Image: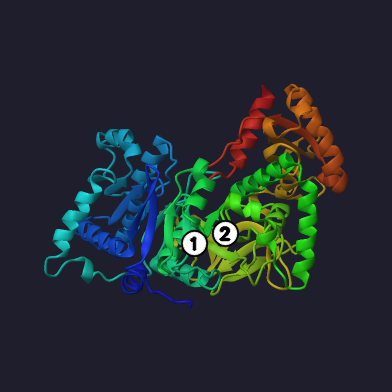
Amino acid sequence: MAKKYRDLREVLKKIEKEFQNEVGFLYKVKGDIVSIKYEQFVKDVKYLGEYFLNKDLKNKRIAFISPNRYEWEVTYMAVACSDLICVPLDRSLPEPEFRSLLLRSEAEILVYDKKYSDIIEKFKEDSEINVKEYICMDTDFVEAIEKGKELFELKNNKFNRVRIDDNAMRMMLFTSGTTAQSKCVMLSHKNLCAQLYGISFLYPITKEDVYLSFLPLHHTFECSTGFLYGISVGAKRAYCEGLRHFVENIKDFNITCFVTVPAIMEGVYKNIMKGVQKSKKMWQLKAALKASEALKKIGIDVRTKLFKDVHEKIGESLRFVICGGAALNPEVSKALNDLGLIVYQGYGLTETSPVVCAEFSKLNRLGSVGTHLEGVRVKIDNPDEDGIGEIITKSDSVMLGYYGDKEETNRVIKKGWFYTGDLGRMDKDGFLYITGRKKDVIVLKNGKNVFPDELEMALSKLPGVAESIVYGATQEDGDINLHSKIVFNKKELPEDIASKDISEIREYYWNLIKSQINKKMPSYKYIKNVIVTEEPLIKTTTNKVKRMDEIKRIMETEEK
């Protein structure tokens, strides 16, 4: 049943009241699964919160950085439930960016994983960094909790007297910065609790579910949809050991659901199809899919039984996957769902806490990102003749603004509406379809608009394409031609092509573009050139392509 929380302390109280005897957290130590009950989690949160509150912090800001682990989640809730300010930092940050964000956040305590120890030693000698205390999760964390416990057990402890200001900035989240310096998004307890309320209408997760913590926890998608929503319903949280252990962990922990990004699900699909091709059973798969589709039309769902081999390889307990962060290829989405691997798409931004729209069992439509969450309004601003315009949204989940940047805040928030910078259209039933980023649209000399995402989706279907980018190249006469760059994976190319040199591989792709893409497009969308490489595109730490940086690199390379 949907529940409205005023702040995250109310979430903690619910856990203490309803789930303290349940196992809440699972992780592996030398191959063995270790479990922690919610009872311990609640105590650790209270004691660590008490420890922080007795530090007399001037700025109230506590930063933390680590891979996904129990101590990260305890730190987050301890800081949040103490009415202090959470500063979760990207675990993949290079040292200069790590230092920069630490300075910008003005954090006074840094909680960190031991893998950052060498960097931390440098920071301790850095006179510009104002961190007063460094707490290593592997060596100092237990001691901090023990000291907090002593303080908590005294009369009139500080933690029990905390009153949350649910409208104030209590989370500082640095965006991944695909085009410029990362912005600092300010979120409140009200923002996050509105998000929990909206999500609760979508997914029937209970204390019986086992949720895989896979995407980085500093990412709002994982933090809100996975961590905060998961603990609010008493679900178990299992920490993934890393990408190479992904499928193994799904099976070992009996995972029922998780949040992920399209690249992972597209990889899962490719591996399934590779296995089918290797076993030479493609005709059997096609026949089974036809039979499954026919039975579904009369209300009989036999996908799990028909495709038992697939489910055994991925994990038989898996009920559904929530996919976001970018657009999932509709063909991959349909293929996975046809096999009984249920994938729901979602759409959102850090600035919206993050989910704006999502699919779920009763409301989904191929190619869309679903409909708006409960309590969220979505509109298309200034739509063109095809109904495409900027997506704007209004809700209690919309951020307070960008820290230290009033001008940018006023540019994106007008009369309570947040202007996402994303382009899309909405059908008559309220399903939202994303068409691209406003700043990425290529405007041709004839006034036509080209959305690179559409062409990049088409390129992704070509054999061996790992990733691609489409961009506008200005010609001598001022006209703009559409050019592309393909990153290929040799292992996925036909054997006779993989053995060829780079110029021949380029010719192979150029012929495919002309015959399989350009022929299906109006002439103004023709791709006029292609570059091929095995070198990955420039990306953020959350794996989004830094489009402007990549185009700049292409232009500089071509000038040489």
Q: Give the number of marks.
A: 2
The numbered mark, 1 or 2, whose residue comes first in the sequence reads: 1
Give residue 448's mark.
Answer: none
The residue that appears at 62% across and 47% down in the rendered structure is 268
Q: Residue 356: where, in percent of width, then height?
A: 57, 65
Which picture quadrant has residue 432? bottom right
Q: Quadrant of the C terminus?
A: top right
Residue 513 in the figure: left or right of residue 146: right
Up-down relation of residue 540 to residue 82 (above or below): above
Which picture quadrant has residue 533? top right
Q: Nearer the viewer, residue 258 or 254?
A: 254
The residue that appears at 60% across and 65% down in the rendered structure is 358
Q: Real-space Cα distance between discs 1 and 2?
A: 9 Å
Asked whether residue 214 appears in the rendered view, the answer is: no
Q: Do residues under tags 1 and 2 come within 8 Å of each other at their CB atoms?
A: yes
The kind of residue on which mark 1 rests is Thr
- Residue situated furthest left in the rendering: 155
Q: Residue 446: where, in percent of width, then height?
A: 82, 48
Q: Residue 213: where, in percent of width, then height?
A: 46, 53
Up-down relation of residue 35 to residue 132 (above or below): below
Up-down relation of residue 436 to residue 534 (above or below): below
Q: Secondary structure at mark 2?
A: strand
The residue that appears at 65% across and 61% down in the rendered structure is 304
Q: Residue 108: where, in percent of width, then height?
A: 26, 49
Judge the density around disc 1: few (<14), some (14-19), many (≥20) Cα neighbours within 10 Å: many
The kind of residue on which mark 2 rests is Ile
Asked whether residue 474 appears in the rendered view, the answer is: yes
Q: Which residue is mark 1?
A: 225
Q: Which residue is mark 2?
A: 322
Residue 37 in the figure: left or right of residue 360: left
Q: Secondary structure at mark 1?
A: helix
Residue 363 in the figure: left or right of residue 63: right
